[in-house]
Image (cartoon, rainbow, N blue to C red):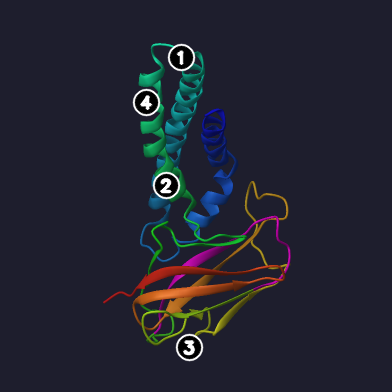
Amino acid sequence: MDSVWLGTICGRACVFLCIPTLTVMWGALLTRVPNPFTLMDLFHVFLILAIILAVVAGISSILAGFALMSGGPSARKLGLLAAFLALVSGPLGIALGAGIGPGPVYPGLGTTSGLLNAVKDTQYGGPWQGQKVFWYIAPTYRGRVLIRGRRLDGAGWLGFNGTRIPKHELRIEPYDTVTWSGQPAHARGIPTAVRALTSGCYAAQIDGKTFSKVVVFTIDLTP
């Protein structure tokens, strides 16, 4: 039981450590909306509320842990309170991250539900729709990355960047990265356009020198 509460507290601490990275990942998704600064302000308000809730959940977890170990009369009530706060604050912390997949390369879709809302191509006027995705590479991996993808529930392939026609693959070199305040040592990340011709379920295969992972998500095109 002690390890459960310790794991809960450690999970809350990750929110504090990753604030700069979460801000960059969220900001990369706001380049095509009318009021990006307003949405960024709302994101920070939401982040502060989530942190406050995380602190309360962490404190209640500690109190519940001591109460359960001592067998006090308040153990049951504190345990239920801690469990409720964990259920409420858990999804908030995950949603703020917006990164999905097993890693060490995480695509930030803006939602952990695995949905990417694509918009029409106003720059080149082509049929391919797309959306910005921030690819975060954990410090534990420093090599090259190759990303390719295709539709699972029909014909079609996943496009990356490009002009009127996107590229079939995305290559991230060890030196490819943007910089941000509070960037962890050796962490990398780049924003790119992920594009598709049709709505559907897509799989992105992410290959590195030491791993090969598949991330599945849904792309919903603008009518």
Q: Is residue 23 above or below residue 49?
A: below
Which of disc 1 and disc 3 is earlier in sequence?
1
**Mark sitting on residue 81:** 4
Q: Amino acid at mark 3?
A: Ile
Residue holding disc 3: 165
Which of disc 2 and disc 1 is earlier in sequence?
2
Q: Amino acid at mark 4?
A: Leu
Dot 4: what SS? helix
Q: Which residue does the image show at 43% across and 50% down from the upper left?
A: 95
Dot 3: what SS? loop
**Mark sitting on residue 43:** 2
**Mark 3 or mark 1: which is in front?**
1
Q: Is residue 95 left or right of residue 174?
A: left
Q: Amino acid at mark 2?
A: Phe
Which of disc 2 and disc 4 is earlier in sequence?
2
Q: CA distance from mark 3 to mark 2?
A: 33 Å
Q: What residue span does the magenta drawing correspond to?
A: 128-145
**Mark 4 or mark 2: which is in front?**
4
Q: Which residue does the image show at 43% across and 58% down from the upper left?
A: 110
Say whether residue 196 is magenta: no
Residue holding disc 1: 71
Mark 1: few, some, or many residues within 10 Å (few <14, many ≥20)?
few
Whether tag 1 and tag 2 are in contact, CB under 8 A, the answer is no
Residue sitting nearer the eye, 120 or 124: 120
* Residue 186 location, quadrant: bottom right
Q: CA distance from mark 4 to mark 3?
A: 53 Å
Q: Which residue does the image show at 57% across and 50% down from the upper left?
A: 21
Residue sitting nearer the eye, 200 or 174: 200
Q: CA distance from mark 1 to mark 2?
A: 41 Å
Say whether residue 144 is magenta: yes
